[in-house]
């Protein structure tokens, strides 16, 4: 069973059903039923036309549900429009579905959550982690969003800002290694940049390219994380870096600064440094100041504390950190790093161990555990 093929075909099937007049919630249910049937049937009887097979089965599942529900009996008229036998046209509806999910009837956060779940293929747990909320809270938010759009016609797509946020979250999940969606997010953002001339769209594309350029160096052969300062910069993709910088410079020249352009500027400064020691941390702090002004995001402030620690010394970084909520994700890891830089190895080891217990994935937990063990060993000498 090719799970990647199923995941890639899902947006196209959803798009076909939505264009045929089915509301999004019902279409999503029908597609999920078709995917379950594919898992059962395809291993022993693979179809010649997977997209056509899924579309036909999803359509029939929708019709079955419509007949069983008196409130939806009017949809039985759509039987005559059942897709004809034979290969179905392969149309990429993914980006259009991102806009459809960003419906004006939803709040921005609900639209993002719904899109990540229905189109991006992320789990509720992954979305909750991205939003820094409990899984149960996110499950309720997604359910409310599905109820809100149930029965609505998707003739009023949402705004670009919401779609950009969804694409960035999808990219981050792929970049973390939990789900390999980074390349797909870049592909869709390229499509969006080609269709919409907006500096923030360009800024997001530049940010993705600059981060993706470092991907090969982010893990060791054994799968362990390699911190930015220790990465082999010869493994960075200079072609992607050059493209990202060029796109960013054109966006910044339009003097309409947004958060994605500011984040891309920080990534570009990292990419421009020949070595970690030559990083222009002073300028990075200045860009974080711009990000704080634009977003007032606590995670941005946390990252800014690291940059301040590099630019002005670890004690200055610890002072910036002290002003933040210590329950923030990765707060303990930042505190550990700054305490180590300040020479307080015992506190650093304790905070690394604390951060490891809170780590969102196995690779990060193992990295932080090794850091704690390293400092504990130094302390025993």
Image: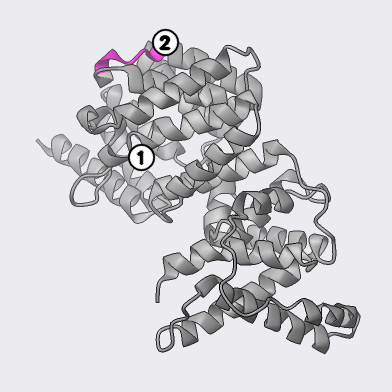
Reading the chain from its start, which is encountered first: label 1 or label 2? 2
Q: Position of residue 282 (x, y in %)?
A: 42, 10
User: Magenta part mainly helix, strand or loop?
Assistant: helix
Task: Determine which quarter of the picture holds residue 189.
Answer: top right
Task: Determine which quarter of the picture holds residue 35.
Answer: bottom right
Q: Quadrant of the C terminus?
A: top left
Residue located 45% across and 67% down the image: 5
Residue 265 visible in the picture: no
Magenta range is 277-282
Q: Secondary structure at mark 1?
A: helix
Q: Secondary structure at mark 2?
A: helix
Residue 106 visible in the picture: yes
Q: Quadrant of the N terminus?
A: bottom left
For disc 2, the marked residue is 282
Q: Position of residue 146 (x, y in %)?
A: 75, 63
Q: Nearer the viewer, residue 333 or 274?
A: 274
Q: Position of residue 315 (x, y in %)?
A: 38, 17
Q: Nearer the viewer, residue 234 or 332?
A: 234
Residue located 48% across and 28% down the image: 206
For disc 1, the marked residue is 351
Q: Nearer the viewer, residue 19 or 267?
A: 19
Q: Position of residue 238 (x, y in %)?
A: 30, 27
Q: Is residue 73 above or below residue 372?
A: below
Please tell me whether mark 1 or mark 2 is closer to you in this view: 2
Residue located 55% across and 23% down the image: 261
Give the crowd class for mark 1: few <14, some 14-19, many >=20 residues within 10 Å.
many
Q: Is residue 31 above or below residue 257?
A: below
The question of residue 311 being in magenta is answered with no
Q: Is residue 27 above or below residue 317?
A: below
Asked if the residues shown at circle 1 and circle 2 are in contact, with their CB atoms under 8 angstroms apart, the answer is no
Is residue 57 rendered to the left or right of residue 308?
right
């Amino acid at each position: 069973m090719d799970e990647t093929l199923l995941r890639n075909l899902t947006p196209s099937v959803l798009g076909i059903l939505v264009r045929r007049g089915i509301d999004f919630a019902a279409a999503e249910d029908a597609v999920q039923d078709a995917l379950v049937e594919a898992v059962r049937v395809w291993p022993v009887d693979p179809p010649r036309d997977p997209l056509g097979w899924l579309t036909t089965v999803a359509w029939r599942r929708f019709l079955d549900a419509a007949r069983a529900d008196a409130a939806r009996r009017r949809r039985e008229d759509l039987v005559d429009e059942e897709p004809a036998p034979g290969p179905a046209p392969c149309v990429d509806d993914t980006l259009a579905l991102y806009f459809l999910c960003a419906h004006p009837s939803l709040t921005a956060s609900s639209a993002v959550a719904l899109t990540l779940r229905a189109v991006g293929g992320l789990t509720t747990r992954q979305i909750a982690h991205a939003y820094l909320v409990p899984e149960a809270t996110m499950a309720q938010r997604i359910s409310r969003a599905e109820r809100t759009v149930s029965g609505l016609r998707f003739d009023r797509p949402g705004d670009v800002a919401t779609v950009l946020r969804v694409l960035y979250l999808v990219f981050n999940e792929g970049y973390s290694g939990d789900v390999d969606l980074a390349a797909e997010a870049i592909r869709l953002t390229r499509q969006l940049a080609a269709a919409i001339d907006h500096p923030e769209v360009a800024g997001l594309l530049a940010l993705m390219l600059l981060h993706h350029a470092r991907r090969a160096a982010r893990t060791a052969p054994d799968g362990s994380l390699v911190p930015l300062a220790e990465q082999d910069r010869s493994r960075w993709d200079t072609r992607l870096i050059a493209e990202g910088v060029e796109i960013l410079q054109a966006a910044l020249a339009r003097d309409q600064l947004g958060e994605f352009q500011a984040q891309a500027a920080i990534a570009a400064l990292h990419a421009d440094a020949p070595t970690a020691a030559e990083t222009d941390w002073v300028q990075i702090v200045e860009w974080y100041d711009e990000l704080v002004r634009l977003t007032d995001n606590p995670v941005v402030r946390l990252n800014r504390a690291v940059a301040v620690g590099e630019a002005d010394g670890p004690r200055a970084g610890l002072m910036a950190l002290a002003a933040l909520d210590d329950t923030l994700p990765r707060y303990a890891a930042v505190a550990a790093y700054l305490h180590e830089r300040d020479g307080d190895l015992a506190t650093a080891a304790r905070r690394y161990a604390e951060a490891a217990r809170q780590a969102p994935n196995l690779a990060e937990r193992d990295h932080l555990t090794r850091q704690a063990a390293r400092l504990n060993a130094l302390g025993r000498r």
